[in-house]
Amino acid sequence: MAATMHDVARVAGVSVKTVSNVINDYPYVRATTRERVLLAIAELEYRPNLSARGLRSGKTGVIGLAIPELRQNYFAELADAVIRAAERRNVAVLVDQTGATREGEMAVLSGDRLRLTDGLLFSPEQLGQEDVGLLQVPFPLVLLGERIFGGPTDHVTMHNVGSARAATEHLIEIGRRRIAVIGAHPTHPDDIRSANLRVRGYREALDAAGIPYDPALVRVAAPWHRENGAAAMRDLLADGFEFDAVFTFNDTLGLGALRTLGQAGIRVPEDVAVIGLDNIDEARFSVPSMSSVDPGRDQIAEVAVDLLIERINEKGDPAPPRQILADYRVAARESTGFVDPVPALATAVSPSVLADQGPA
Amino acid sequence: MAATMHDVARVAGVSVKTVSNVINDYPYVRATTRERVLLAIAELEYRPNLSARGLRSGKTGVIGLAIPELRQNYFAELADAVIRAAERRNVAVLVDQTGATREGEMAVLSGDRLRLTDGLLFSPEQLGQEDVGLLQVPFPLVLLGERIFGGPTDHVTMHNVGSARAATEHLIEIGRRRIAVIGAHPTHPDDIRSANLRVRGYREALDAAGIPYDPALVRVAAPWHRENGAAAMRDLLADGFEFDAVFTFNDTLGLGALRTLGQAGIRVPEDVAVIGLDNIDEARFSVPSMSSVDPGRDQIAEVAVDLLIERINEKGDPAPPRQILADYRVAARESTGFVDPVPALATAVSPSVLADQGPA
DNA sequence: GTGAAAGCGCTAACAG
DNA sequence: CTGTTAGCGCTTTCAC
């Protein structure tokens, strides 16, 4: 049987209260007493029972992270960043996969799958703006991603319009004019999900450069998987190959498009420049290496964990929901004619806080 | 304040024991009573407090998974499989990253980072055979990977020798004779870690086919990252290019090697056939797609979770440690001259061209 | 500075 | 079949 606090107290010749004080860094403990207690702890290899602590304090020190699937690179890297951020704050992370299904995402919000967690970071992939009401849950929740805006919870997300505009501007800067896009969704024009936000950023860049918008260059691809990037590129080529650059709405689509271009014998970046968005690790290792926009994933993880912990510890009336947009930057690589930079490092954290709740 | 069992009992007009019985599917509860309790639970939106349950029962229903880094594809896919397997058994998974450091791995074993978990799945990357003693820990532990063998705990691992032999045999079957290897480690010949096991499988296949072993074709690369696969391939080419196939000890090395071959203008598979090991998702999407040996990751996850749960629930003297080897199979793709199996895709591409989105 | 004692919400004897 | 009750190990008033 593992040692309990009472055992420690007995061995150290003090009361359990004193042991508790030592463990919880209560300042008013005489140094010699503290020493004796620590000795007893070491001797007995005592470890606090976290279930008991959780029961007593109402907090477990664990947060949940609900994502579609770890095998999608983007989410693996997000989970990595979240776990690191949480660890720095002495919090553990329980990872839940929704399987990218609507039922999975609803189950997470119902709280049935919440296990021993104080709150949840949630990155939906199926739920959309029309489900915003489901975010009204009886536990601390921080929303990630670009599926829903203006909900009742804190929300940390990349800057969709800005990073799409940056990607497009990068292609324009290297002299491209016929810039295709892969990853649009066939949705209502006023829908604010990320595909449309990225189309908006793309058009803003075109407008600013005085380049006319050609709907024939904007291709649908959903979901944003490699197969669909490859297929969309095949379509683009079949339709007459009248473009000199492609902006794919994520890196996975871009890697698929690169594959098709390679098979078709089209040179990248000479004939077609390619840029993605997400800056997943893999983009550095394709042939050619792929330029991308880094949407500030590490920063998103840091901020999201901070906000969630803040909400968990919040007392009294909850503060109004906040939306945080991460900083972004272009990572230029071979696919847009740059030599690979030294590996990118974590950027400083200076999130832009949006006053209103409008979409990014 | 959230509802407790007592609230439910009061509303349903029964005792807490009955509520507990209903929740825990105790069979001997009258149907009408059960109905009344379920109604009260729904009405109050009651959720059991898992800290209390954990304290009482000594089990939390959570297991830990300690891996080097989620951003390594292999581990993301492993974690994915583990979480799925655990979910089927109604267990949650807390993911811990050791950062591929010795300190991180030791910290995990010390139990200091164990939080609310009933046991641990541990995949070391730094600890080696000499650290086998550290695996003697006071909590249920199941070892994964190929760093340590013969330890005091259950161990689930791929079949290193067998899958390396299968990879080599595959190359021999398509007519290759000068088969290089990338990924050997500069260790003692009697060391049993996976690099050596894979060299052994390679040699077994050569011997069986009557092909002489040429040490000049066996290249060191460590760690098994893309950069090192690319570098080893550059070395091989620089040394005279006297090989017609390469077996890389994991897929990541293989993708690096592919990159070098592509840059050097060497045709795959015509000039050089390539096969990896791990069968990560990414292997299906390189150019050309890369053959690999599937080491049975899903099976490893299933079995590992089963063994761990079994150990957690074990009473009395522990059974002796077991070692389980997973089944493996070759996934033949373009890099060894096979056409890809049709990729499973879920495309929603009716209008390939997006309708105009209105003014920007 | 430290001790005594209550009780967090649940499960599992045990009694009926 | 169902109710009563005693803790699980910890934190936290409240005394001293």
Image: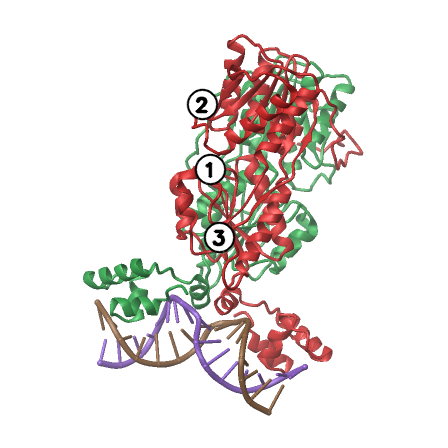
Chain colours: A green, B red, C brown, D purple
For the residues labelled 2 and 3, the Cα–Cα distance comes to: 33 Å
For the residues labelled 1 and 3, the Cα–Cα distance comes to: 32 Å
Which residue is at the front of the view, B184 or A205? Answer: B184
Left or right, C5 with respect to B247, comes to left
Task: Report the disc number at residue B54.
Answer: none
Is residue B290 in view from this perspective? no
> Which residue is depicted at the point 31% across and 70% down?
A16
Which residue is at the front of the view, A19 or A328? Answer: A19
> Which residue is depicted at the point 51% across and 37% down?
B146
**Residue annotated with mark 3:** A308
> Looking at the picture, how far across and down is residue B279, in whole percent?
63, 32
Task: Report the disc number at residue A342.
Answer: 2
Q: To which quarter of the image does residue D12 belong? A: bottom left
- Mark 1 vs mark 3: in front: 1
For the residues labelled 2 and 1, the Cα–Cα distance comes to: 26 Å
- Mark 2 chain: A
Which quadrant of the figure contains the N terminus of chain A? bottom left
Q: Are marks 2 and 1 in contact (CB under 8 Å)?
A: no
**Residue annotated with mark 1:** B125
Circle 2: residue type = Val
